[in-house]
Amino acid sequence: MEFLIYLSTYMLTLCFIFFPKLITGKIFFIFWYSFSLCLSIIIRSSIGIQDSADIDGYIISMQGEDIIPYFLREPIFWFGTRFLYDILGNGIYVFVFLDALLFLLIYYGFDLCRKAFHPKLNSSNLHYLYFAVFLFFPYVVGMHNIYRQIFATTIFIVSIGLIGNNKIFKGYISSLVAVLIHNPAAFFLPLLIMSMKKSFYKYLAFIVLALILFSFQTIQQTGSSLLYAYFLRDDSIIIGDNIAYLYLISLYIILGIVLLIEFQIEDKSNTHFVSMFIILTILYSYVAFLFGSEQSQRFVFYIFGILFPFFGFYFESRFKPIILSRLIFFHVSLMPLILIYNTTIDVSL
C-alpha cells in the first residue's frame, strides 16, 4: 500500500505540472490535504510491523516516564508527544495527528515564502510542489525516521516566510519553537536574519554565519556539544563514507550554475534565494570537512529541506518553457530518493 500511495503522489505531481489549474482555491487545499492524510495513515499503519529506529524510539518515549536530559532541551516534542499519547492512547494516532499538523505547516510555509519573495508567481502554478515535496528525500526519510528534524525544518520554513512578510516577532517565536523541537535548527539563524528586507541584515547574517563557523571549529576540537550530541550523531541512517563529499560536490555544482545564470541576468528577484544558497553551502562545507559522512547527513537534510520550495520558485520564475522546467526540477529532485534512499519506502504490495 505504501508504494501505491507514493506512486499516486508521483502521478498527481505530473498531473499538476501539466494542468496546474485543474483544481484551484479551497478545493485544491481540501483535495491535497485529504490526500496527505491518506498518505499519513498508510505510512503510520506500518508502525509496530516494520522496524524504524527513530519512530519506534519515539513510541517508547511516549509510553515512558523517565526524563532524559535532552528531553529538557527539546521539551515541545518530547513532552508534547507524551501529552498526546496520554490523550489518544495509541502511538499511531499520535503520529497521524502530528502529520496532520505537519502538512498544514508545509502548506502555510510554502505559501508564506511565495508571498514574501516571489509575490508575482501565481500560486496555482505551484500546486505540483505540494505533492512533489512528499517525494523529496528529506521529507520521505523524515516521515520514516528523522521526524523531529523534518518537523523543525518545516517550522523553520514558516519562520522564514513570516519574517519575509514583515511578521518578524512571529517569525522568531516560531523559529524558537523549531529549536525546542530539534535544537540544531538554531544553527540556521543567518537565514532568518537574511530574510529581513533591509540590506544591513544581509551583512549581519554573514557576521552571524562567521560566528557559527567558529563554533563548529570549537565543537570539532571538544567533541561534545549541542551540535555533536543532538545533530551530528546519527545511527539510523548509514549510507557510505563518501556521501558527504558527494553532497558537497552537488551543492557546488548547483550553486555554480545558479551564479552563472544570475550574473548574466539584470533581474535580481532571486537575490534572497542565492544568498540563502551561499550561506547553506558554506555551512555544509565546514560540516563535511570537520565531521564524518554519517554525521553530516542530518545537516544536508536540513539544507535541502529548507531549499526545496525556493528551488521550485526559482525554476518557475527563471526558466522557460515552464512545463519543461517543472518536469526537470521534479525529476532531478527524485534522484537522491531513487539512487541513495531507495529502501526508505516499502515497495511490497
Image (cartoon, rainbow, N blue to C red):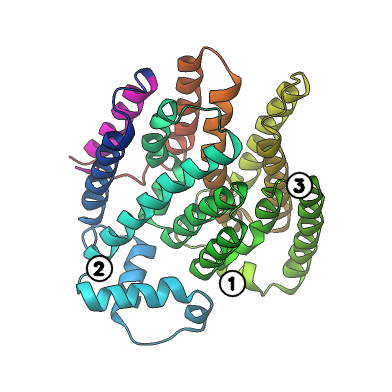
Q: Is residue 232 visible?
A: no
Element type at mark 3: loop
Nearest the viewer among 332 and 208 is 208
**Residue under the point 36% across and 44% down:** 343
Which kind of residue does numbered mark 1 sit on? Ala
Q: Position of residue 231 (x, y in %)?
A: 57, 64
**Looking at the image, is mark 2 or mark 1 earlier in the sequence?**
2
Q: Gap between marks 2 and 1, in whole Å?
A: 26 Å
Against 315, is 38 above or below?
below
Instruction: Determine crowd level at label 2: few under 14, some 14-19, many 20+ residues with C-alpha closer than 10 A.
Output: many
- Observer-nearest residue: 329 or 174? 174
Expressed as whole percent of the image width and height from the top left, the position of residue 254 reads: 65, 31
Mark nearer the viewer, 3 or 1: 3
Residue that badge 2 annotates: 91
Choose top left, top right, bottom left or bottom right for residue 47: bottom left
Name the residue beneath numbered marker 3.
198
C-alpha distance separating marks 3 and 1: 35 Å
